[in-house]
Amino acid sequence: MPDALISGALLTDTILGHGLPAAAEHHLTQAGLCWHDEPKAEAHLAQALLIAPDHAAVLIGLYRYYFYKRRLPDALDIAELCLVKACRDNGFPEDWRQVTSADAAFGRYEEILPRFFLLTLKGYAYLSMRLGQLNAGREAIDKLLELDPDDRIGARVLLDVANRVGVDDDDD
């Protein structure tokens, strides 16, 4: 197998769960199975977080749990942690606002870590806007479009929503 394919497969495995301790995976699975029982699900998520506090699978599990429970402020907190992780894992500046198109091959679909960064930033933008933090949302959308001018990640949809905020339907 060519080195590029091997490293791509390793990166994919890392993002999707490779290296996740079995105990953390167990707690994530259990949280999913009992997600309707919030105290129980949250106890499992907390255990997964204790075992693997910086693993993408755990952070994504927490994000999804809060998002689908409509606990958007909590989901935004996790999105911010994911942004810090994505910046660190990609070797980007700590502040996502300082990331430039020269920092990674953002337009290449097979580049898993830069794509993780873009998807995380998109989630952050969406949640910021949903929570009324329109300036933060628009800033993230602008960064997405700067890094992904072909809009493979779908940021223009968010931009359209941001542009419609406060516009009366009769203004069309």
Image (tube, rainbow, N blue to C red):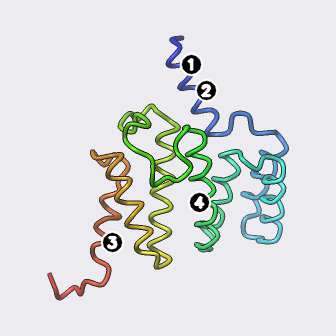
Identify the element where label 3 is drawn. Answer: helix
Q: How far separated are the C-alphas under marks 1 and 3?
A: 40 Å
Query: Mark 1 = which residue?
Result: 6
- Residue shown at 17% from the left, 88% from the top: 170
Please say if the residues under marks 2 and 4 sit with CB atoms less than 8 Å apart: no
Of residues 20 and 90, which is closer to you in this image? 90
Q: How far separated are the C-alphas under marks 1 and 2?
A: 6 Å
Query: Mark 2 = which residue?
Result: 10
54 vs 152, left or right, is right
- Residue shown at 64% from the left, 70% from the top: 74
Give percent across and percent down for residue 151.
31, 49
Closer to the chain start, of discs 2 and 4, is 2
Badge 3 amino acid: Ala
79 vs 170, left or right, is right
In the picture shown, does residue 101 fall above or below 170?
above
Which callout, 4 or 1, points to the residue nearer the camera?
Answer: 4
Image-quadrant location for residue 39: bottom right
Badge 4 amino acid: Glu
| Badge 4 density bin: few <14, some 14–19, many ≥20, Cα 10 Å | some
Closer to the chain start, of discs 3 and 2, is 2
Of residues 8 and 146, which is closer to you in this image? 146
- Residue shown at 32% from the left, 62% from the top: 157
Q: How far separated are the C-alphas under marks 4 and 1?
A: 30 Å
Q: The N terminus lies in which quarter of the figure?
A: top right
| Badge 1 density bin: few <14, some 14–19, many ≥20, Cα 10 Å | few
Badge 2 amino acid: Leu
Query: Mark 3 = which residue?
Result: 162
Closer to the chain start, of discs 1 and 3, is 1
